[in-house]
Image: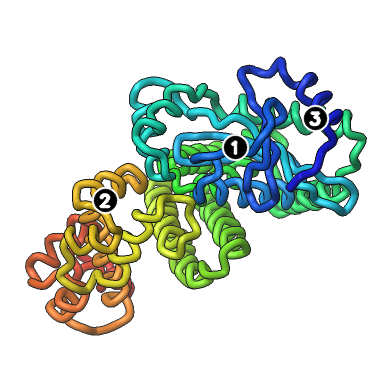
Amino acid sequence: MPILSHELQTRLYEELESLEAESFYLCSPEGHLAGSLREAGVPSGWLNAESPVQSRREAFQESVRWGEPWVFSLLPGLLSWIVPLNDGNDLNGALTGTPRLTADGPQARRECVTNLMAAGCTRAEAEAEAEARPAGDEALARRMADAVFTAFYRISGWRPGILDRNRAEAIRRRKMTDTLYPRDAAPRPVYPLDEERTLLALMKSGDRKGARRILNRLLGSMFARSPDIHILRARATEMMGYLVRAAVEDHPRLSPAIERNYEWMGKIVQAHDFEELTGTVIEALNAFMDSMYLVGASGSSTPVYAALRCIEMRFREPLTLEDVAGAAGLSVSRIAHLTKEVTGRTIVEHLRRRRVEESRRLLEQTDRTCADIALDVGFGEQSYFIRRFRQATGVTPGRYRREMRGDRDD
C-alpha cells in the first residue's frame, strides 16, 4: 500500500480541498483503496469490489506507461482519475478521486444503479450511491488529476523518474507518428492520440456507450484531417493495431484477437468510402469488446461474462434463455436485463450475431452448402438462416460468398 506521512497527507489535502466536492483516496498498484486523505480507515463496500479494483489497476498501469495522470471509467457511466506516486525508481501506489457520473439526470442515475448492483451493491445501497454521486465530464476529471499531480510532486519533493522517462518515450513516439503522417502547411484539426487511450480504457471497463462516443469522435477527427480514403484506411488500421496490442499486453488470453484483427484490417483496407469504413471499424470494435468479455478482460459484471461465455461455447446448439440464465446463476429476466444494460444487446442478439459471424467464416473459407452451414452454426432451417443472414449483412449467404471471392457482378 502507498505510504505517506501524516504531515504530507495533511498538507496535500489542505492544498486540494478547494476542488469541487472531491475526496482523495490512497490506492495500491493492484487497485485496492487503502484509505482517504480526509478520513481514517479503509473504504469498504463497492469501491473495493472486483470490477472497480480491476479498473483502477489497469488505469494505474496505463498511467505509468504514459507517464502522466490518467482519466478512466471506473464502471460504465462512472468516471474517475488516478495519479501514480513515483519517487525515483520506486512506485508507491497512487492517489485517486471521487467517482463522478458522466451524465446527469434521472436516466443516468438509473443506469448507475444498475451498474452498481452488477458490482455487488444491494438496490438500496446502489440507489443511495447513485443519488450521492456528483456529475462531471472528462475535462473536469483531467483538470483535477493534473492539479493533484502538480500539487503532490511540488509538496512531496519526490522525483518521478519512471514517469518522466515514460512520458519522454511517449512524446518520442508521437513525433515519429507525425513524421510518418506529416501534416500539411495549412492548419488542420489535431488527431487526438490521447483519446485512443481513453477508448481502450472504456472498452476494458465494459462501457460500450462511452467507447462508441469516443470512437465517433476519433473517426470524425480522422475525416477532418483528411477525407482521402487511402489515408483514412491507414489511420483506422493504425488505431485498431494499437487497441489490440495494448489490450494483449495486459491480457495475454486475448492473443487470438490478433489473428481476428488481421481479418478486420483486411476489410478496412478494402473499404470503398468513409461510410463503409466507419461501419467496418464499429463492427470490429464491437467484436473486439465481445472478445474482451469472453476472456474476462473487461470490467463488466461476472454474470454477464458467464452468459456470454455460455453463448460462445454453445451457440451451435438449440440454446434457450433458460440455459444462459442457468450458466449465469440468475433468473431469465435478471440476466436478460443485465446483459442488455451492460453490453447494449439482448441475449438473443448476441446469439444471432455469433451464429452469423461463424457462418460468414464458413462461407469465406469453405465450400460447404448453405444447408450444411445453417445446421452447423445453430440456425437449423436453411430458409431461417438465409433470412437472418440477410438481416445482419444486407445480402444473402450466396451473394456474400461470391463477393468475398471477388465476383461482384449482379
Mark 3 lies on a secondary structure that is helix
Q: Is residue 339 left or right of residue 222?
A: left
The circle drawn on residue 117 is none
Q: Position of residue 348 (x, y in %)?
A: 20, 55
Q: Position of residue 240 (x, y in %)?
A: 53, 57
Point out the residue furthest to the front here.
41
Query: Which image quadrant: the C terminus?
Result: bottom left
Q: Earlier in the sequence, mark 1 or mark 3?
A: 3
Amino acid on which disc 1 is placed:
Pro
Amino acid on which disc 3 is placed:
Gln
**Cα distance between the residues tagged 2 and 1:** 29 Å
> Mark 1, residues whose alpha carbon is within 10 Å: few (<14), some, or many (≥20)?
some
The circle drawn on residue 335 is 2
Name the residue rendered at 55%, 61% in the picture.
Answer: 244
Mark 2–mark 3 contact, CB under 8 Å?
Answer: no
Q: Is residue 10 left or right of residue 330?
A: right
Q: Nearer the viewer, residue 133 or 234?
A: 133
Mark 2–mark 1 contact, CB under 8 Å?
Answer: no
Q: Earlier in the sequence, mark 2 or mark 1?
A: 1
Name the residue rendered at 72%, 29% in the picture.
Answer: 37
According to the picture, the residue beneath numbered tag 3 turns out to be: 9
According to the picture, the residue beneath numbered tag 1 turns out to be: 43
Amino acid on which disc 2 is placed:
Ile
